[in-house]
Amino acid sequence: MPTDSSALLTTLVAFDTTSRHSNLALIDWVRQYLAGLGVDCRLTYNDDRTKANLFALLGPAERPALILSGHSDVVPVDGQAWSSPPFVLTARDGRLYGRGAADMKGFIACVLAWLPSVLAVHAAGRLWQPVGFALSYDEEVGCLGVPRLVSDLIARGVPVAGCVIGEPTLMRPVVAHKGIAHFRCRVRGRAAHSSLTPLGVNAIEYAARLIGHIRKLADAEAQFGRARPLYDVPFATLQTGLIHGGSAANIVPSECEFVFECRWLPGEPLSRYIDSVRDYAATLAEEMRRQAPEAGIDIAPLIDCPPFESPEDGALMRYIAELCPDQPRQAVAYTTEAGCFSAAGFPCVVLGPGSIEQAHRPDEYIEAEQLTICDAWLADLREILCRLR
């Protein structure tokens, strides 16, 4: 089996783990790789057992572990113009091209290449703090897999000192990010011929009023909301991203559906925004039912990925301060699985090789130098974990 990070990345990229597919082939390969090192894995599955998370623990299990975590799935390549096959790692001009090379199989490859050295220092009696290795499914479609992994850790009483989520940050520590939640809103009115408009209840127009309310909430946050200067967008945001409704221009539409999102800051409840949307929807629905008792508005959650913020102190942040002494700490508007780990009470930081600017793009790549930097960072981390007492 390959053992260095670039060779391991070649293998990982070759697995088409687009979120709509199973990730079990990749998980089984990693499980066999770890079994070859003498490491047992624990899998947690989705409901139909077509996808799995993986967790492995190396070192003295009685002490709290430092978890290094990544997601196995990647976004689709459909409709993108690639210069080389997306699931064949291709080297050009110091860059390694392939879907997932940056987001985030580069980090996974580096960790897999590093684990044999962790086992070696453990065998020598030098490793003081254990290392956890975690792989999840369906991060790209709403962090659906990792909550099951986290729940399993809690149920088994696995002690956790902290988590490094290896999303591409150019090896610069991200210490906070926003949460993201999507909601589907279905508006049911009453159809009528457009010449008899007053007899109907126009679902599109009522949806538009609710969308306008969501926009007013967003504008209020931009003007008056709590701002956090560390973020590129320093306030909470709301927006409507999808909408469809109606069947013909001369029919009062009886149905309209839209999806809206909220991205909110750590320390704030999502309910602060969503309760306002639900309250206004209830007011509109009451008005609609005066004309059509069957009318109504239903709002259902689709995804809910919480925000996170690193603690100001503690073991994890001491490691980061030592390993990244000249790197400024960042906060970002995008969301990662750090929110799910953090919600369980596990201190987190987001840090990994590659640039987020390459994520999800055609000709996604990672600089080969970034793998080298991550390899060296992990080697330094191993020495920290050995000297702790």
Image: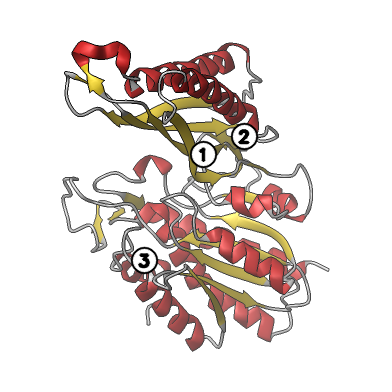
**Distance Cα–Cα, label 3 vs label 2:** 38 Å
Decide: is 85 above or below 310.
Answer: below
Q: Is residue 131 left or right of residue 359?
A: right
Q: Which mark is residue 9?
A: 3
Identified by mark 1, the residue type is: Ala
Disc on the earlier residue, 1 or 3: 3
Q: Which mark, residue 181?
A: 1
- Identify the amino acid type marked 2: Leu
* Residue 355 % position (x, y): 42, 44
> Could you classify mark 3 by the number of other residues whose Cα lies within 10 Å: few (under 14), some (14-19), or many (20 or more)?
many
Q: At x 28% / y 29%, what residue is drawn? A: 245
> Split into 4 quadrants, where in the image is the N terminus?
bottom left
Q: Position of residue 295 (x, y in %)?
A: 42, 28
Label 1 Cα crowd, 10 Å radius (few <14 / some 14-19 / many 20+): some
Is 307 left, or right, of 290 in this rendering?
A: right
Amino acid type of the residue tagged 3 in the rendering: Leu
- C-beta proximity under 8 Å, tags 2 and 1: yes
If you read the primary sequence from the N terminus, does the residue marked by circle 3 or circle 2 appear first? 3
Report, in whole angstroms, how far the alpha carbon at label 1 lies from the one at label 3. Answer: 32 Å
Residue at screen point 63% across, 69% down: 152
Q: State which quadrant residue 129 falls in.
A: bottom right
Task: State how many labels appear.
Answer: 3
